């Protein structure tokens, strides 16, 4: 396999900080969520796909019983002894720099999987997944490191167990109360396909997107507005959903259907009701999108993507003017559908675009941003790609 720049960066960083050749090179992709936003932690449905932007972990075993991590994004190398890895979990995590909590959190989550004496591990990380754009750069780090540790520690875990370790790192070590969509997408992605996930049972199905055959591509429009899910709006939305489920007497909002919304409107205050309505209708839209893809192909999903965006803008209130402008302009310039993707409050929108219109859409969005006084967006195409793997 020919290694791209980020893979070479990881190996070069390994040589510079740790020294010598790594035992192997593992990688995991970022993801785009086609539809199903804020449904994962409500036990619902999502339809993400892994993208052709990846994080690489060059790693090797070490005789010293500690994990040592280096990243091209940081000057310092961080090391923590294996018997002190719980350091990255709540209460003590402030002692570890935030960037290092992702890989060390994964190591900490995987540690109890094997009793025998584990060797230490040295790992150097490099990535071409944009950070803070809603493309799950964090899940890409977690899953690349999880794949590396699975082999180096001979754990032989399945992909779902590795995804769970990534999520645990995100929740406990980083402190972002996210669901499991991003890690499952990074683990289970397949070229030219999306992964249909039931976030309650964790059952998954690969769904052909048929974008290539239909001459369609996916354009990411990165607003450059960064966000953190460890603080603020994401957590509040999650709490609103838990409140809605409790008032409605169900385990999770997954257990409500569109028919329950009239009763929800009677029992809940206006804001809580709208949060609930987003999740309930979004679950329906994921199922409808899967059905549309299967029955008619991708040409018919545009309205569902737009309805999803409107629901996030009006009911869940997680969009921002830049994302609304991106979506409206993309569709006016020829996209068959568009929506913000990821947790919201910034990040990126995606547009499904006939290949011949990619330039028109990019130009139109760039001009609309300039006219509104927004910082220039970064537009780039992504293709649905394979999940975590060993590259060398
Ligand atoms: C972030 C989280 C995911 C999911 C999305 C919203 O990406 O990491 O678990 O909740 O937001 O759909």
Image (cartoon, rainbow, N blue to C red):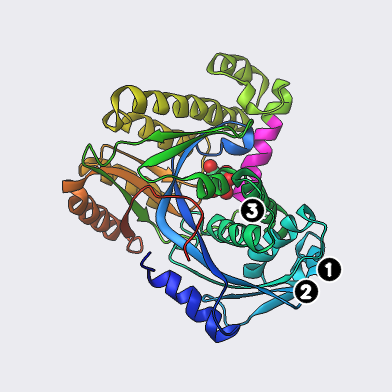
Numbered badge on residue 166: 3
Q: Would the CB of label 3 be found within 8 Å of ligand 1?
A: no
What segment is highlighted magenta in the picture? 231-243
Numbered badge on residue 83: 1
Residue drawn at point x = 69 percent, y = 34 percent: 242
Residue drawn at point x = 19 percent, y = 54 percent: 359
Which is more toward the observer, 121 or 53? 121
Residue drawn at point x = 48 percent, y = 24 percent: 284
Main SS of the magenta segment? helix
Q: Are marks 1 and 2 in contact (CB under 8 Å)?
A: yes
Report how far apart the C-alphas of labels 2 and 3 lie in the structure: 22 Å
Instruction: Give the number of the mark in front: 1 or 2.
Output: 2
Instruction: Give the number of the mark in front: 2 or 3.
Output: 2
Q: Are marks 2 and 3 in contact (CB under 8 Å)?
A: no
The image shows residue 139 at horizontal and vertical percentages of 56, 55
Residue 288 appears in the rendering: yes
Numbered badge on residue 65: 2
- Secondary element under disc 1, as helix, strand or loop, is helix
The image shows residue 357 at horizontal and vertical percentages of 18, 47
């Amino acid at each position: 396999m020919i290694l791209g720049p980020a893979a070479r960066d990881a190996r070069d960083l390994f040589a510079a900080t740790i020294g010598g050749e790594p035992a192997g090179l593992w990688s995991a992709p970022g993801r785009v969520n086609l539809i199903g936003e804020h449904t994962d932690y409500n036990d619902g449905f999502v339809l993400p796909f892994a993208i052709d932007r990846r994080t690489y972990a060059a790693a090797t075993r070490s005789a010293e019983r500690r994990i040592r991590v280096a990243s091209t994004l940081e000057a310092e190398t961080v090391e923590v002894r294996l018997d002190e890895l719980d350091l990255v979990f709540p209460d003590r995590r402030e002692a570890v720099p935030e960037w290092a909590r992702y890989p060390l959190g994964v190591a900490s989550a995987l540690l109890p999987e094997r009793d025998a004496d584990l060797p230490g591990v040295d790992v150097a990380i490099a990535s071409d997944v944009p950070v803070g754009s809603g493309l799950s750069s964090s899940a890409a780090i977690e899953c690349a490191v999880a794949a590396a540790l699975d082999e180096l520690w001979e754990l032989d875990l399945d992909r779902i167990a590795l995804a769970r370790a990534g999520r645990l790192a995100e929740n406990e070590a980083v402190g972002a109360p996210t669901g499991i969509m991003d890690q499952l997408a990074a683990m289970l992605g397949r070229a030219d396909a999306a992964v249909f996930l039931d976030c309650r049972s964790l059952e998954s199905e690969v769904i052909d997107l048929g974008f290539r055959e239909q001459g369609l591509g996916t354009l990411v429009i990165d607003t450059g507005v960064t966000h953190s899910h460890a603080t603020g709006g994401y957590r509040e939305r999650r709490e609103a959903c838990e409140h809605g489920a409790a008032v409605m007497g169900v385990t999770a909002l997954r257990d409500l259907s569109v028919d329950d919304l009239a009763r929800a409107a009677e029992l809940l205050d206006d804001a809580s009701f709208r949060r609930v309505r987003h999740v309930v209708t979004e679950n329906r839209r994921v199922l409808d999108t899967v059905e549309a893809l299967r029955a008619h192909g991708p040409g018919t999903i545009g309205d569902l993507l737009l309805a999803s965006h409107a629901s996030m803008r009006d009911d869940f209130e997680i969009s921002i003017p830049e994302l609304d402008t991106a979506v409206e302009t993309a569709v006016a310039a020829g996209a068959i559908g568009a929506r913000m993707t990821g947790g919201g409050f910034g990040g990126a929108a995606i547009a499904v675009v006939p290949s011949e219109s990619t330039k028109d859409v990019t130009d139109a969005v760039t001009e609309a941003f300039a006219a509104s006084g927004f910082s220039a967006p970064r537009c780039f195409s992504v293709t649905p790609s394979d999940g975590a793997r060993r590259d060398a």
